[in-house]
Image (tube, rainbow, N blue to C red):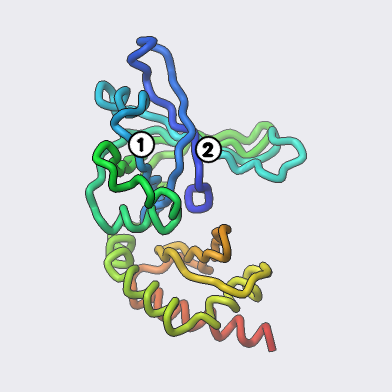
């Protein structure tokens, strides 16, 4: 859910009216380790709330398509939201939320990332669990290594291997579409865009380096070609 959700509900402690919880709809993108990245305006009420108290919750809804939403999965992430000035993470957010490019450079906007401390997951009736935040994100060292190589991997795959990307989407994921691009890769999998839709392709097991990512991409292409005949 942390990798797949493109929107979330941000909960902050309100300054006005003081002491009341406030919720806001926000766009998100996953950092390489899976933690949510947000783009917020300093003029918004929720960002002013953060200036007084950086403790927040972020609610992710995985119930889309469920006949009864109460039986679907959802999770609330608890942690502290901090300013993020890494240009690689900013670029990643904008690949996942391209419409935000029209205002991301405005002086009052800035990127933030959640440092997850705890999470409360609900998977349906009588299925609720508290989870330590350290168990929710990918291996930090692997995520940093892959993040450094991500731009180069995306450029190479999109420029030189569009047919492999199409096979990832149509054969391995069983989706329709002709024009596919890769917008992200991380220790747990990769994300493809076709039209306005983002599709997630998980790896069979987490990878620990950029070199391993490249080997997995080759293996996935071979698998897709074999399945397609």
Q: Quadrant of residue 154?
A: bottom left
* Residue shown at 31% from the left, 53% from the top: 90
Q: Position of residue 179 (x, y in %)?
A: 57, 73
Question: Mark 1 = which residue?
Answer: 117
Outermost residue, right side: 67
Q: Residues within 10 Å of mark 1 (few under 14, many from 20)?
A: some
Question: Mark 2 = which residue?
Answer: 75
Q: Position of residue 4 (x, y in %)?
A: 53, 52
Q: Which label's residue is closer to the chain start, 2 or 1?
A: 2
Q: Marks 2 and 1: which is nearer the front?
A: 2
Q: Position of residue 107 (x, y in %)?
A: 24, 40
* Residue shown at 47% from the left, 65% from the top: 189
Q: Residues within 10 Å of mark 2 (few under 14, many from 20)?
A: many
- Tell me how far mark 2 sits from mark 1, CA to CA: 13 Å
| Relative height, residue 144 to residue 167 (above, below) | above
Residue 88 appears left or right of 195: left
């Amino acid at each position: 859910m942390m990798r797949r959700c493109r929107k979330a509900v941000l909960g902050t402690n309100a300054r006005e009216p003081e002491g009341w919880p406030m919720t806001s709809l926000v766009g998100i993108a996953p950092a390489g380790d899976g933690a949510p990245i947000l783009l917020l305006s300093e003029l918004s009420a929720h960002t002013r709330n953060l200036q007084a108290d950086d403790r927040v919750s972020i609610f992710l809804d995985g119930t889309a398509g469920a006949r009864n939403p109460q039986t679907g999965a959802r999770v609330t992430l608890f942690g502290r939201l901090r300013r993020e000035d890494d240009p690689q993470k900013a670029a990643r957010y904008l690949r996942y939320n391209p419409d935000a490019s029209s205002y991301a450079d405005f002086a009052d906007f800035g990127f933030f990332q959640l440092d997850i401390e705890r999470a409360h997951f609900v998977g349906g009736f009588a299925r609720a669990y508290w989870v330590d935040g350290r168990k929710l994100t990918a291996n930090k060292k692997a995520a940093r290594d892959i993040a450094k190589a991500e731009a180069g991997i995306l450029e190479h795959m999109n420029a030189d291997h569009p047919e492999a990307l199409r096979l990832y989407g149509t054969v391995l994921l069983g989706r329709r579409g002709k024009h596919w691009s890769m917008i992200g890769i991380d220790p747990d999998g990769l994300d493809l865009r076709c039209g306005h839709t983002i599709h997630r392709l998980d790896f069979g097991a987490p990878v620990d380096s950029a070199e391993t990512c490249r080997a997995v991409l080759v293996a996935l292409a071979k698998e897709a070609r074999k399945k397609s005949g």
